[in-house]
């Protein structure tokens, strides 16, 4: 048994154990041993998991490329007739990367959480939920079949709800948690529908199914020929899965919960709502990339949604003043980039952006959390400024992360975002590229706006706060610094060919995820051609279709040399982000008057108002979805009150009348009969008892008389 | 002397016994009536045995008579014992006063 097989099962189990301990005994530990012991205990399980994840990662790098998919079967789970779901973990390059992201960032944020939650009375509950979240997320990542993945999927949703509403005594937080939960539920319904469709078709076509990804991939060619509701089956499944991703990964129209989710503690925002949970949708798409390869129309739909999300939320981010809200909209926007990459078939680019985004967005959130604590829970950027002097480590870390997110050359965001934009241009359409390109500039603008408003210029806070604000303790700032360094350097893992690199990251993912070499539509047509040829040339198509996949997805031959174009686009986006960053510098640092002048015009005011109110999407939902639903409920309530209650009351009234009739009948007739029977028996008994005189001679005499009569009868009538 | 003479005596005995049984109030006298009834029956058996045409069962009726005599002796013993017990309990043996079994 190799190292990987022995340690991987513990990676999700340990945090689960930690959650149990913290949840059941945390309060006692907290009161008996104090905050530090509780915190260290809470961090220990994620830390061990992280160690296991790193050692497994090293181990998998030592394996031959063909042996890098490791399935660890623990036990049977659901065994019902055709459905044979096993409790199996799958460790391959894709889940290896996700494990690294989840456990390392998770551990850092747990440590950071010790500082952030200092003095909170629900200290142990926080760690219980966080551990539970890690367990669920790792389950999601490691699951070898759709059911286990869905289990983790629901688990992270639950933890997200619990942690958003962590300070539930304030109504606003509880409402935000509820909103996140309900919106996620809509998405989950889509995902579940997809899974059920897969299960149904697998069972009817192949007799039995275990819903594992391997089986799903093996069956994909057969499934591709099926239709459902008159539509191609795979397209429907792909869209269903994407609806799930929409909810979890906050895409239009289900993104509204994510900005509100900022009501939770900042470590939660960093871990769940920036680095890990919200990227579950991207991970899921990467996991079932073979499905999306066969569903080009679904990808087209996704690309539109992704580009819209990316652009819209970036523009909203420009007009927010709450520091966490800016970052939240930025997250939505970056998730849009990831889905953009997925939708043009650049799966590895999307997952790489997931990785880099996890690093820099977690750093940004943790930095903002550090500021929020230092300012006694003030989040409005208009009341900040000049903080770099007071909080240097936080400040420089955040600036580093900002450089990464804007795509400053050679930082991680530069490599990942550039790859996405390039793929969107060459495999999608120039329109997609343009939207992404504009959004990249806006990203740079709002991020620098955040940095300038927070760390530079004159301070705008009151003196008391200014005097009291200071750099946070080491347990808070060191994790931020570590992530900031990662955000700067991690990009070198995937240096593209035209910059002299080898796309190591993409090749690392090769055993599990194949990028498309052309646009999804073209790729799909190519696959169809290959299939037709096979059917003509050979009868043994089972083995061939396997190789057909690889031909279509791995083939780079005959590609035109695009190096010049690639350079050009890259230079354009760098110049554009520099320009918008500089614009932020002018507006918020050097010459605020210019901004005020522009903002003074009525037109600019209108735009600002629209953006500041988030395009009135919440109001739109309120008017279009919630109000009608409430009206429907009111109507149903009235219906219930009048018609249903009326019927019930009428039925009750009728019952009373009938029963009073029955009562009379009962009293007079039934009781009369019963009494009559009793009375008759009594009278008869009295009569009969007088025969029993007790006088023996009477008895004998009457016997004699009866005997004589009987004999007389016998003689007269029978004789 | 034919069978009829025997049956006539037997019927007279039976009637006497029955009249005594019903009319007398003393329990001992009632028992005497019962003896008469039994003897009437025994006389009938013996008479029918004497006049039966069957050669195979000449003695059946005689044996029945012997049994009835034995039965009468046993009856007298038990009945007199009951009479004694009744006397101990009620201090009299008048049949029309012993009405504890009245329903």
Image: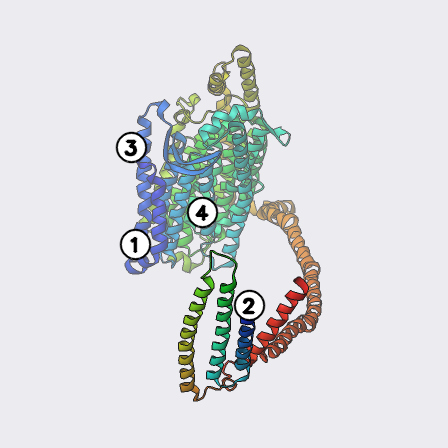
Label 4–label 1 contact, CB within 8 A: no
Q: CA distance from mark 2 to mark 4?
A: 135 Å
| Residue corresponding to mark 4 | A269
Horizontal and vertical percent position of residue A206: 51, 27
Depth order, front residue of A203/A149: A203
Q: Secondary structure at mark 2?
A: loop
| Residue corresponding to mark 2 | B2
Which dot, 3 or 4, sits closer to the camera?
A: 3
Q: What is the crowding at mark 2: few (fewer than 14 residues within 10 Å), some, or many (at least 20)?
A: few
- Residue A430 is left or right of residue A266, and the answer is right
Q: Residue at x 39, y 43 (%)?
A: A135
Q: CA distance from mark 2 to mark 1?
A: 135 Å
- Residue A108 is left or right of residue A559, and the answer is left
Q: What is the crowding at mark 4: few (fewer than 14 residues within 10 Å), some, or many (at least 20)?
A: many
Which dot, 3 or 1, sits closer to the camera?
A: 3
| Residue corresponding to mark 1 | A36
Horizontal and vertical percent position of residue A216: 48, 29
Marked residue chain, label 3: A
Residue A12, located in which quarter of the rendered image?
top left
Q: Residue at x 32, y 52 (%)?
A: A39
On whether disc 3 and disc 4 are found on a single subunit, the reply is: yes
On whether disc 3 and disc 1 are found on a single subunit, the reply is: yes
| Residue corresponding to mark 3 | A3
- Residue A165 is left or right of residue A674, and the answer is left
Which dot, 2 or 1, sits closer to the camera?
A: 2
Label 2–label 4 contact, CB within 8 A: no
Q: Earlier in the sequence, mark 4 or mark 1?
A: 1
Depth order, front residue of A542/A204: A204
């Amino acid at each position: 048994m190799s190292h990987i097989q022995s340690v991987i099962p513990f990676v999700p189990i340990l945090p689960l154990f930690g959650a149990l301990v913290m949840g059941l005994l945390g309060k006692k530990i907290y009161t008996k041993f104090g905050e530090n012991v509780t915190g260290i205990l809470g961090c220990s399980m994620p830390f061990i998991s992280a160690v296991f994840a790193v050692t497994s990662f090293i181990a998998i790098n030592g394996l031959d490329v063909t042996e890098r998919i490791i399935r660890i079967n623990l036990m049977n789970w659901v065994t019902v007739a055709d459905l044979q779901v096993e409790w199996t973990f799958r460790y391959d390059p894709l889940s290896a990367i996700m494990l690294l992201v989840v456990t390392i960032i998770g551990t850092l944020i747990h440590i950071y959480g010790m500082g952030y939650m200092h003095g909170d009375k629900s200290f142990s509950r926080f760690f219980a939920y966080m551990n539970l979240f890690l367990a669920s997320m790792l389950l999601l990542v490691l699951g070898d079949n759709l059911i286990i993945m869905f289990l983790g999927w629901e688990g992270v949703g639950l933890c997200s709800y619990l942690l958003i509403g962590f300070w539930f005594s304030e109504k606003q937080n509880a409402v935000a948690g509820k909103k996140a939960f309900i919106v996620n539920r809509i998405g989950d319904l889509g995902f579940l529908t997809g899974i059920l469709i897969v299960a149904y078709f697998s069972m009817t076509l192949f007799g039995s199914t275990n819903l594992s990804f391997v089986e799903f991939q093996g069956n994909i060619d057969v499934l591709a020929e099926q239709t459902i509701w008159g539509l191609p089956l795979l397209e429907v499944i792909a869209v269903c899965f994407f609806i799930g991703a929409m909810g979890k990964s906050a895409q239009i129209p289900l993104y509204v919960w994510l900005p509100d989710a900022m009501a939770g503690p900042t470590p939660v925002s960093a871990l769940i709502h920036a680095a890990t949970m919200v990227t579950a949708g991207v991970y899921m798409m990467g996991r079932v990339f073979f499905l999306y390869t066969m569903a080009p129309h679904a990808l087209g739909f996704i690309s539109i949604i992704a580009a819209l999300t990316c652009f819209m939320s970036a523009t909203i981010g420009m007009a927010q003043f709450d520091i966490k809200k800016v970052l939240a909209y930025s997250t939505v926007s970056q998730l849009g980039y990831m889905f953009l990459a997925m939708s043009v078939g650049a799966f590895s680019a999307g997952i790489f952006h997931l990785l880099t985004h996890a690093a820099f967005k977690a750093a940004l959130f943790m930095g903002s959390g550090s500021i929020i604590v230092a300012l006694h829970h003030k989040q409005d950027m208009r009341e900040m400024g000049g903080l770099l002097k007071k909080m240097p480590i936080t400040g420089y870390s955040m600036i580093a992360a900002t450089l990464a997110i804007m795509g400053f050359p050679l930082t991680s965001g530069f490599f990942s975002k550039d790859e996405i934009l390039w793929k969107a241009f060459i495999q999608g359409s120039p329109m997609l590229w343009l939207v992404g390109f504009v959004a990249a500039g806006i990203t740079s603008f709002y991020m620098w706006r955040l940095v300038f408003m927070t760390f530079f210029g004159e301070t705008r806070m009151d003196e008391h706060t200014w005097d009291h604000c200071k750099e946070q303790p080491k347990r808070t700032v060191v994790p931020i610094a570590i992530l900031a360094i990662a955000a700067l350097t991690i990009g070198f893992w995937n240096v593209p060919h035209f910059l002299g690199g080898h796309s190591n990251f993409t090749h690392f993912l090769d055993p599990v995820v194949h990028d498309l070499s052309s646009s999804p539509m073209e790729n799909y047509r190519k696959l169809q051609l290959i299939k037709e040829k096979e059917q003509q040339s050979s009868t043994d198509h089972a083995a061939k279709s396997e190789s057909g996949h690889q031909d279509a997805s791995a083939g780079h031959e005959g590609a035109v040399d695009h190096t010049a174009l690639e350079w050009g686009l890259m230079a354009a986006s760098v110049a554009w982000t520099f320009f918008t960053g500089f614009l932020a510098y002018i507006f918020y640092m050097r010459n605020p008057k210019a901004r005020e002048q522009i903002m003074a015009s009525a037109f600019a005011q209108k735009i600002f108002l629209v953006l500041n109110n988030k395009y009135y999407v919440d109001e739109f939902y309120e008017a279009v979805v919630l109000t009608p639903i409430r009206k429907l409920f009111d109507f149903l309530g009235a219906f219930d009150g009048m018609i249903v209650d009326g019927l019930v009351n009428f039925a009750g009234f009728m019952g009373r009348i009938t029963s009073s009739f029955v009562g009379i009948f009962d009293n007079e007739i039934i009781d009369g009969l019963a009494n009559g029977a009793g009375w008759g028996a009594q009278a008869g008994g009295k009569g009969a008892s007088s025969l029993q005189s007790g006088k023996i001679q009477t008895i004998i005499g009457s016997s004699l008389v009866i005997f004589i009569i009987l004999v007389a009868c016998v003689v007269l009538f029978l004789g | 002397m034919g069978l009829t003479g025997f049956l006539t005596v037997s019927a007279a005995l039976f009637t006497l016994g029955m009249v005594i049984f019903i009319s007398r109030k003393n329990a001992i006298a009632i028992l005497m009536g019962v003896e008469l009834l039994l003897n009437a029956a025994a006389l009938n058996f013996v008479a029918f045995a004497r006049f039966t045409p069957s050669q195979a069962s000449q003695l059946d009726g005689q044996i029945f008579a012997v049994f009835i005599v034995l039965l009468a002796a046993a009856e007298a013993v038990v009945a007199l014992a009951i009479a004694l017990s009744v006397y101990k309990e009620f201090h009299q043996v008048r049949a029309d006063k012993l009405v504890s079994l009245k329903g």
